[in-house]
Image: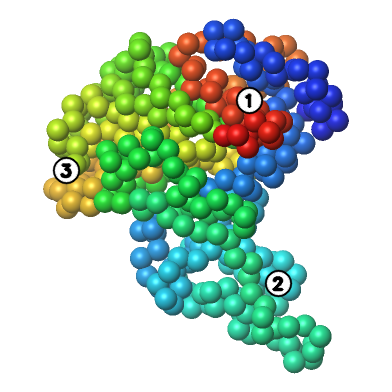
Amino acid sequence: MARTTENKQQSTKSGEFSSTRRELAHARHLPGYLYTSPEIYAEEIDKIFMKDWLCVGRVEQYPNVGDYRAMRIAGEPIIICRNQDNKLKAFANVCRHRGVEVAPVGGGNTKQFTCPYHAWLYDLDGKLVGAPFNKETPGYDFKSCRLPEVKIDTWCGYVFVNFDPNSISLSAFLDDPGVRKAEQYLHPEKTRIGDEYTFDIECNWKFVPENLMDIYHAKAIHGTSFAKHFTMEDYPFELGPGGRYHAEYESLTMAPDGETLFGPMPWRREASKYWAFTVFIRPTFNVFGRQDMIQPWISYPLAPDKTRITIWTQYPTEFFEQPAFAGKNKIIADFIRLVAAEDADMMRSLQNGVNSRNFVPGPTIRLEKAIHHTLNDYLDRMFDAGRAAAE
């Protein structure tokens, strides 16, 4: 039931999205085809994922020279590595000969990357350092050959890349009150990953951040897990330009019965045990903080109806030295998997629902304020370039 790009353009001109553009109390959710159409999906990759800064890891995952990770982000194969100068570099994982990935998806430590097809060799700066029979091809500049670079930068221990060589800087991209509060409250650079959970889910990528900022569903879906102690009324939404959103709110930590197993983070000792914080960094980076931990969710599209999600649980470095750390960490790891499974069931059902001939977008509810805000930013970026530029 996906519509063609021509159908989409015609319906946009006729004001199909005007109902989503209304004020929250009178607005409607997006049409279903925006979550199912291959044409829309391809346009999203070009206009959003190839333009924004994307979080792809943590600095701690590259402690030594030669450490690398090869991954595919929104369909683009890339390598991130620590070079001989101890700097993080990012390259397109595409051999300059036939395009084969020079490093398999995964990670490790190496001195050079070797294309498995014809054995072209690249160093940790992406420079070609060897190619069999290259002297028999005088018309090609082997000396200047290198893997295409991808822009890379870091924020608070997180690694970001940007596929657009003309993009704004990461610091400009993150210039937002919610991000500054995350720096002040959470200090992610002083934490390490205690648990990493990655899974694929059969839903459109937009449903993941929408679900994570959906206060309306918390009691219904998570009423027997973390939302037993969650305050829905008067939720303090803080909206910013460009779809930005953050909030300080009341919720116990992400552990059984909401009780901390490690005690507070050193820089949050004065915070109430009910203190919680979240910030959304578009397009798909949701950071959640509690008194004792940080739990970011990152998601990337694999197809119009398939998304890969990674959840990190981060603790202050000193927590790793606490007695029985492994056992306590396992309890929290099991709990976040339980919560994620509750959400995953609903996101799969959302995908099935919007693909139905009977789906008609329903009203946006007061507790969906952040979703409504983000949906309108999405429409700006996809269909209203003038309005998006103003943000």
Which residue carries the number 2 mark? 96
Dot 3 amino acid type: Pro
| Front residue (pair 310, 178) | 178
Question: Disc 3 to disc 1, how far (Cα)?
Answer: 41 Å
Q: Amino acid at mark 1?
A: Gln
Q: Quadrant of the C terminus?
A: top right
Image quarter of residue 229: top left
Numbered label attached to residue 114: none
Which comes sooner in the sequence, label 3 or label 1? 3
Q: Residue at x 23, y 37 (%)?
A: 292
Name the residue: 71% across, 31% down. Answer: 383
User: For the residue labelled by badge 1, is the local secondary structure a helix, a strand or a loop?
Assistant: helix
Q: Is residue 254 left or right of residue 319?
A: right
Q: Amino acid at mark 2?
A: Arg
Residue 224: image location, x then y, percent: 34, 17
Distance of mark 1 from mark 2, alpha carbons?
38 Å
In the structure shown, which secondary structural element does the residue marked by tag 2 occupy? Answer: loop
The tag on residue 351 is: 1
**What residue appears at the point 38 percent right and 44 percent down from the top-left corner?**
312
Q: Quadrant of the N terminus?
A: top right
Label 2, residues with CA under 10 Å away: few <14, some 14-19, many ≥20 = some
- Residue that badge 3 annotates: 266
Res 200 seen here: no
